[in-house]
Image: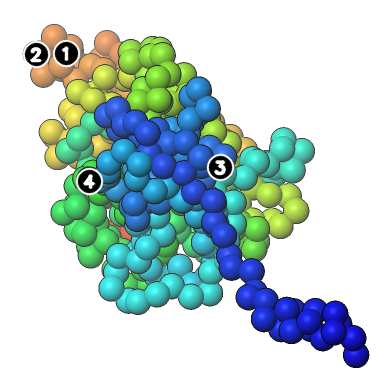
Amino acid sequence: MTATAALSRLIAAACVPPLPVQRGGCVVAADGQIVEAVGITGAIGHRVTISGLAGEIVGFRDGRALLMGLSPLAGIAPGALVLAEPAGGDVLAGNGLLGRVIDGLGAPLDGQGAIRDVHPVPATPAPLPPHARMRVTQALPTGVRALDALLTFGVGQRIGIMAGTGVGKSVLLGQITRWAQADVVVMALIGERSREISDFIDTELSGEAKARTVTIAVPASDAMLCRVRGAQRAFAIAEWFRDQGKQVLLILDSLSRVVHGAREIAMARGEPAGARGFPPSALQLVADLAERAGGDRRTGGAITLVATVLAESDDRADPVVDAARGVMDGHVLLSRKLAGRGQFPAIDLASSASRVMIDVASADHNAAARRFRRLLSLADDNRDLVLMGAYAPGQDAELDLALALAPVLTAFITQDRGQQADWADSVATLAEVVAES
């Protein structure tokens, strides 16, 4: 062996294996909720750490990355180290999430330890194209008599529940969560008070319902960005179960608070405001999320979306309400006036509609529902007239009938919190009620 060969062997043996190198950047500016950094490589939505604190890339400006915190960014100073996380913006989904409670970033909140049997999936995949979607032709029993009989839901439908505060929205959602005939329930509690979240989990998700439910909880105190990411995580988890052929019920409470979070993000990065202070990208999020629901022809699975929309002060001209009406396949309005009368669920049938009921219910069922709604509307519209003594019986036969049946109609749509209604019994009772007319 030559001296050169021997020296080469010694050098090769002495070489240190290459060390992993991660490219990072540094903070150069901060303005309100936005932190600007240079030297960081990543796409919008990519997760980063800023001096060890969780953040995300939300945009770019003049060669700088615009970052927002997924938690309070306290103590950030110029020159702080920014590193892109290898996992990017993926979401963990799988059977290991059933019965668990997680936050908007996927961390467990239930004290049951690490979550296993999960797999990374894209947080914002492309929605199903039109040709890959199943038609909504199968009814979805919810156990709520007024919904099953008069506003029948369909598997793969997108429903908006429009309501102000304090009208029984959470109770209605709890009933649907416990009793709806679905394989998996994904419950996203976004922007609620921490007390309400714990109360809902303890009271509404008890027993068998909890074992089939994945709960994503994002309290009101969390960063605005977490509201949007929590909603997207809920949809990604629901899509994973749909890909396994499961019938998924996705409940988003509330869509309004998700959009409010998107508005804060858009305005922080300099987007111009649009209708009533909402930048275009914030309202576009309503359609983006709604289009991720529906049935998949390939797997046979489906996501039925029930999203609540807050109509502040019962203002139904709210931009979020208008945007939701435009993309949903039905809407249920809860009335403060009916709640004040003690009628629960306080569903305003005259202002509510299920656009798929004609396809998922029989002709006789649809006819009976139309007749019921007409009689109830007649009785309600003339309620004040009768109370003032301005109407004398005998002037209108149909109104006389509606007034005579009013107690029966009201009793039919009123349901106690713990009373589950059977689908077949609800439809049969509806037929009996309208047969009297």
Residue bearing the label numbered 4: 75
Label 4 to label 1, Cα distance in Å? 65 Å
Is residue 177 visible in this depiction of the protein? no
Q: Give the residue drawn at x 56%, y 42%.
A: 41
* Within-10-Å neighbours for mark 4: few <14, some 14–19, many 20+: few
Where, quadrant-wise, is the N terminus in this rendering? bottom right
Judged left or right of residue 16, residue 226 is left
Residue bearing the label numbered 3: 41
Relative depth, front residue between 310 and 172: 310
Identify the element where label 3 is drawn. Answer: loop
Relative depth, front residue between 92 and 333: 92
Amino acid type of disc 1? Leu
User: Are discs 3 and 1 less than 8 Å apart at CB?
Assistant: no
Q: Is label 4 or label 1 in front?
A: 4
Upstream in sequence: badge 3 or badge 4: 3
Label 2 to label 1, Cα distance in Å? 5 Å
Label 3 to label 1, Cα distance in Å? 69 Å
Amino acid type of disc 3? Thr
User: Are discs 2 and 1 less than 8 Å apart at CB?
Assistant: yes
Residue furthest bottom in the image? 1
* Within-10-Å neighbours for mark 1: few <14, some 14–19, many 20+: few
